[in-house]
Image (cartoon, rainbow, N blue to C red):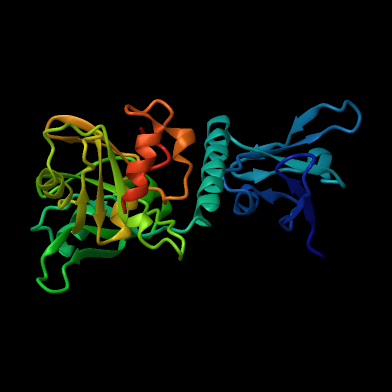
């Protein structure tokens, strides 16, 4: 006797799958569940009444309606709660698959205590997920930490979670960000320099140098004279400078804003119309200075 198959699908509009029957013409529920996990029965549309009918199930065995399976397509039944859970799982899996195509990146960790080692970093960030790389940047001559480092995770979701919060590492709050260095080849210094806005007159170059050294090696600090309520700080590493851009920091109890220091060819006349002393004096001052004024801040 040749083996009989019945056509089964999750939905009437989907392509059916053939499920084998037993020698007595019945179909085991386990055979259905093997192809449709969670299945608890079958139903079919009656050709005459066009109503859905359930297939009789006895102790895990499905019996053919009216002694013949015919050429009908049988639709899988799921428990309501189980079906809802399966749909949620499928949706979550789809999101994970989509995210799986998003590669992780090296994240810069700013504000590290000088004593923090690579093992300390790995131990801390491993609590979020699998870490595939850690590095503490050190001075080539002294071997001392520069106050920042890098970390990379195996999973994109972990990376997103880490970026979204601040981190207490060895007693100090640290930030973890995506490096954003966009310097063009003909402007190599631009991305290493930041503009510090909203400075007060009691802030000295030493104050700024000491403060920003916690993020990385500072190569230069410039405060214009006469005082104009801003300053420029240049780092040895462009990634540190770019990571700080857009931040509001507290220096000597005052909130200062950090942004990119733009190149000289930006149109300062258009952007600083209301600057104290007038555009002409401001333009003249910066025309004599090696430090270009930024395009985004007063």
In the picture, measured across the screen, residue 166 lies left or right of residue 295, that is left
Tell me where residue 284 sits by quadrant. Answer: top left
- Residue 44 placed where, x, y %? 78, 36
Q: Residue at (11%, 43%) from the top-left corner?
A: 207
Q: Residue at (76%, 42%) from the top-left corner?
A: 74
Task: Look at the image and tell me whether residue 257 can be seen.
Answer: yes
In the picture, measured across the screen, residue 141 lies left or right of residue 6, that is left
Q: Residue at (45%, 34%) from the top-left corner?
A: 271
Task: Look at the image and tell me whether residue 130 can be seen.
Answer: no
Q: Residue at (24%, 33%) from the top-left corner?
A: 229
Tell me where residue 34 sits by quadrant. Answer: bottom right
Quadrant where the C terminus sits is top left
Residue sitting nearer the eye, 275 or 132: 275
- In this rendering, the answer to whether 298 lies above or below 124 is above
Q: Residue furthest right?
A: 48
- Residue 217 placed where, x, y %? 19, 59
Tell me where residue 86 sits by quadrant. Answer: top right
Q: How many marks?
A: 0
- Residue 121 placed where, x, y %? 19, 58
In the picture, measured across the screen, residue 201 lies left or right of residue 41, that is left
Q: Residue furthest bottom?
A: 141
- In this rendering, the answer to whether 296 lies above or below 128 is above
Quadrant where the N terminus sits is bottom right
Residue sitting nearer the eye, 37 or 205: 205
- Residue 265 placed where, x, y %? 47, 50
In the picture, measured across the screen, residue 20 lies left or right of residue 120, that is right
């Amino acid at each position: 006797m040749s083996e009989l198959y019945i056509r089964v699908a999750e939905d009437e509009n989907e392509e059916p799958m053939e499920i084998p029957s037993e020698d007595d013409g019945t179909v085991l529920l386990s055979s259905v569940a093997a192809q449709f996990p969670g299945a608890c029965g079958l139903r079919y549309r009656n050709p005459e009444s066009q109503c859905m009918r359930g297939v009789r199930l006895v102790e895990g065995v499905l019996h053919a309606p009216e002694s013949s399976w015919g050429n009908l397509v049988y639709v899988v039944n799921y428990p309501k709660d189980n079906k809802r859970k399966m749909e949620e799982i499928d949706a979550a899996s789809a999101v994970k698959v989509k995210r799986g195509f998003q590669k992780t990146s090296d994240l810069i960790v700013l504000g590290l205590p000088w004593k923090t080692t690579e093992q300390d970093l790995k131990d801390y960030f491993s609590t979020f997920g699998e870490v595939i790389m850690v590095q503490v940047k050190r001075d080539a001559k002294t071997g001392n930490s520069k106050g920042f480092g890098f970390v990379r995770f195996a999973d994109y979701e972990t990376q997103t979670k880490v970026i979204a919060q601040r981190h207490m590492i060895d007693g100090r709050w640290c930030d973890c960000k995506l490096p954003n260095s966009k310097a063009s080849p003909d402007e190599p210094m631009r991305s290493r320099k930041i503009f510090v806005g909203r400075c007060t007159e009691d802030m000295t170059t030493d104050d700024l140098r000491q403060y920003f050294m916690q993020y990385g090696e500072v190569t230069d600090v410039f405060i214009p004279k006469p005082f104009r309520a801003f300053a420029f700080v240049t780092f040895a590493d462009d990634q540190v400078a770019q990571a700080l851009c857009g931040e509001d920091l507290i220096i000597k109890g005052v909130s200062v804003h950090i942004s990119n220091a733009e190149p000289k060819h930006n149109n300062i006349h258009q952007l600083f119309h209301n600057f104290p002393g007038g555009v002409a004096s401001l333009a003249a001052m910066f025309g004599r200075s090696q430090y270009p004024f930024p395009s985004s801040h007063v």
